[in-house]
Image (cartoon, grey):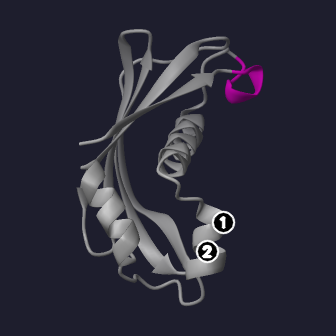
């Protein structure tokens, strides 16, 4: 199982009036980490769309909020690719402030055709790369 860590600095714009990270911002942090995970494997989402005609979209997300992050916190978004299916990538993502566990999430991402918006198989070269990672 390949793990990937992505640092996040919490800015004022990420917080509510009390200086606590607004709940939907965690989804943004996790999206960036998944994007950077793919980028670290040489998989650029713009190229996947333009050259292969595929997109990756979130189908399901389960998130548990354990503790809040606050303005100026430095966070780490840990991303694990835990399962690769014909058209499905399953991720486990956790957000930490130092060693303090703040958020845990399970995210299902589906490969779809850029034109049809219907599930399609992950291309074989990409599948080989991703299965080496799990």
Does 2 appear in magenta? Answer: no
Q: Callout 1 environment at 10 Å: few (<14), some (14 to 19), or many (20+)? A: few
Q: Quadrant of residue 89?
A: bottom left
Residue closer to the observer: 63 or 8: 8
Q: Which residue is mark 2?
A: 49
Q: Which residues are magenta?
A: 11-17
In the image, residue 41 above or below residue 112: above
For the residues bearing labels 2 and 1, Cβ distance under 8 angstroms:
yes
Does 16 appear in magenta? Answer: yes
Q: Residue furthest bottom?
A: 116
In the image, residue 49 above or below residue 96: below
* Left or right of 69 on screen, residue 83: left
Residue at image location 60% in from the left, 36% down from the top: 25
The x and y percentages for residue 128 are: 30, 65
Residue at image location 47% in from the left, 78% down from the top: 112
Residue 46 - label: 1
């Amino acid at each position: 199982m390949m793990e990937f860590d992505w640092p996040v600095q919490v800015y004022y714009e990420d917080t509510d009036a009390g200086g606590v990270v607004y709940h939907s911002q965690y989804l943004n942090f996790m999206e960036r980490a998944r994007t950077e995970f793919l980028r670290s494997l040489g998989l650029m989402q713009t190229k996947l769309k333009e050259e292969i005609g595929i997109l990756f979209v979130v189908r399901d997300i389960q998130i548990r909020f354990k503790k809040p992050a606050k303005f100026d916190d430095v966070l780490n978004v840990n991303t694990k690719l835990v399962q690769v299916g014909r058209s499905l990538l399953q991720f486990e993502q956790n957000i930490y402030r130092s060693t303090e566990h703040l958020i845990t999430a399970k995210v299902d991402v589906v490969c779809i055709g850029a034109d049809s918006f219907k599930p399609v198989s992950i291309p074989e070269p990409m599948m080989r790369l991703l299965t080496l990672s799990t």
